[in-house]
């Protein structure tokens, strides 16, 4: 197959776009498409300071690079979750650090174990919550807090079309209306203090971001987070890939139809936000969920020091 632009040998064929491109044309197309997605959804304004959430994976590092190449003012944030299995957190931090040097940009690192007194996997043993639920809450908290403290205008995440449609399928199957209402490529800032969030890669599939990362030599962590293996999103992605296989463009249409429907459907009113009386971050409660977790950790540690140290040393498996 030949590149549609220059007739060189194509490296990627994208049936959903009815497009085949060679390596260099693909890189230009990918970066241009990101720019057009940003404009389509009016995600960013000139001069805004953007905090890019990076995990050391292909999507977030590619996003950091593309935004930088498009001239956006970026700083990245890496949240060290303390996942020791397969040295996941240390390796992904090393990838993010190396990329910081390559881009000559800057990276803020938050170490959850130091900040909270407990790594993310340790919270599972001590608080009988699902690791991913606590992890998501912790990540959202630090992203927003870092963006607010650093006076950033928006947080950019590397969510791609596969992530978005997998969430959409999960939310639809459970009819989580409040999630369906808020699932959008751009979420405006909400007072008091909930920062704008944007997803400039929402129209790229995983294969497309992986191809871009490969062609531009991005060194990213290939291992999945060990906890992702148990996530239902993997199951949803498999279902959606099978549908896409039999009908190119189905994922994109599924997502676009949600965005169109959002203007017409009646969703429940969103609860009002106020400030957490402990940490001052936005929440619908009087004390935010993060402060509740943090209080619980302190209580457990104060009460049962010996049990904690035994459990800490035993935390290795998922
Ligand atoms: Fe956190 Fe779960 Fe994602 Fe791993 S898979 S990074 S534990 S939310
Ligand atoms: Zn709080």
Image (spheres, rainbow, N blue to C red):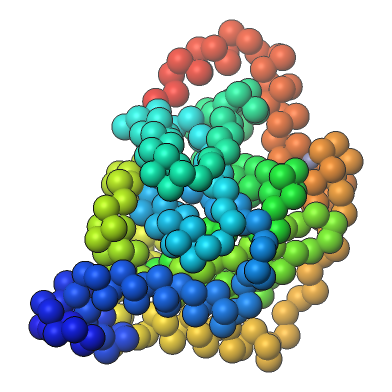
Q: Nearer the viewer, residue 213 or 28?
A: 28
Q: Is residue 87 visible?
A: yes
Q: Which corner quadrant of the figure contains ligand 2?
A: top right
Q: Position of residue 51 (x, y in %)?
A: 60, 52
Direction from residue 20 to residue 272 in the image, left or right: right
The C terminus: image quadrant: top left
Q: Residue at left 56%, top 61%?
A: 72
- The mark total stands at 0
Q: Residue at left 39%, top 34%?
A: 94
Q: Nearer the viewer, residue 239 or 46?
A: 46
Direction top: furthest residue: 306
Q: Position of residue 71 (x, y in %)?
A: 53, 63
Direction from residue 292 to residue 221 in the image, left or right: left
Is 240 drawn above or below residue 194 in the view shown? Answer: below
Is 125 drawn above or below residue 213 in the view shown? Answer: above
Q: Residue at left 80%, top 74%?
A: 269
Q: Position of residue 315 (x, y in %)?
A: 44, 23
Q: Residue at left 45%, top 83%?
A: 254
Query: Based on the displayed image, in which of its 4 quarters is residue 89 positioned?
Result: top left
Direction from residue 278 to residue 42 in the image, left or right: left
Is 105 drawn above or below residue 117 in the view shown? Answer: below
Is 6 drawn above or below residue 235 in the view shown? Answer: below
The N terminus: image quadrant: bottom left
Q: Nearer the viewer, residue 169 or 275?
A: 275
Q: Is residue 318 visible?
A: no
Query: Based on the displayed image, in which of its 4 quarters is residue 96 positioned?
Result: top left
Q: Position of residue 225 (x, y in %)?
A: 38, 43
Q: Nearer the viewer, residue 46 or 36?
A: 46
């Amino acid at each position: 197959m030949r590149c549609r632009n220059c007739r060189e040998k194509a490296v990627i064929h994208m049936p959903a776009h009815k497009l085949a491109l060679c390596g260099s044309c693909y890189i230009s197309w990918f970066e241009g498409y990101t720019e057009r997605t940003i404009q389509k959804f009016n995600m960013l304004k000139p001069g805004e300071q953007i905090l890019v959430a990076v995990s050391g994976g292909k999507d977030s590092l590619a996003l950091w690079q593309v935004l930088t190449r498009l001239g956006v003012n970026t700083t990245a944030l890496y949240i060290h979750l303390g996942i020791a299995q397969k040295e996941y957190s240390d390796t992904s931090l090393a990838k993010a650090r190396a990329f910081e040097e390559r881009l000559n940009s800057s990276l803020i690192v938050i170490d959850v174990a130091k900040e909270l007194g407990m790594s993310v996997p340790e919270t599972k043993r001590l608080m009988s919550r699902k690791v991913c639920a606590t992890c998501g809450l912790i990540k959202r908290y630090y992203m927003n807090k870092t963006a607010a403290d650093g006076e950033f205008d928006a947080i950019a995440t590397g969510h791609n079309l596969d992530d978005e449609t997998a969430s959409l399928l999960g939310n639809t199957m459970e009819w989580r209306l409040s999630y369906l209402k808020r699932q959008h490529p751009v979420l405006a800032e909400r007072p008091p203090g909930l920062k704008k969030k944007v997803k400039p890669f929402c129209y790229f599939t995983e294969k497309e971001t992986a191809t871009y990362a490969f062609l531009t030599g991005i060194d990213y962590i290939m291992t999945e987070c060990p906890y992702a293996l148990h996530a239902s999103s993997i199951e949803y992605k498999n279902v959606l890939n099978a549908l896409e296989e039999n009908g190119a463009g189905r994922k994109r249409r599924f997502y676009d139809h949600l965005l169109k429907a959002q203007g017409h459907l009646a969703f429940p009113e969103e609860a009002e936000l106020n400030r957490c009386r402990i940490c001052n971050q936005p929440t619908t409660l009087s004390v935010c969920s993060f402060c509740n977790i943090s209080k619980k950790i302190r209580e457990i540690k104060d009460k049962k020091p010996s049990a904690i140290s035994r459990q800490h040393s035993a935390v290795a498996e998922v």
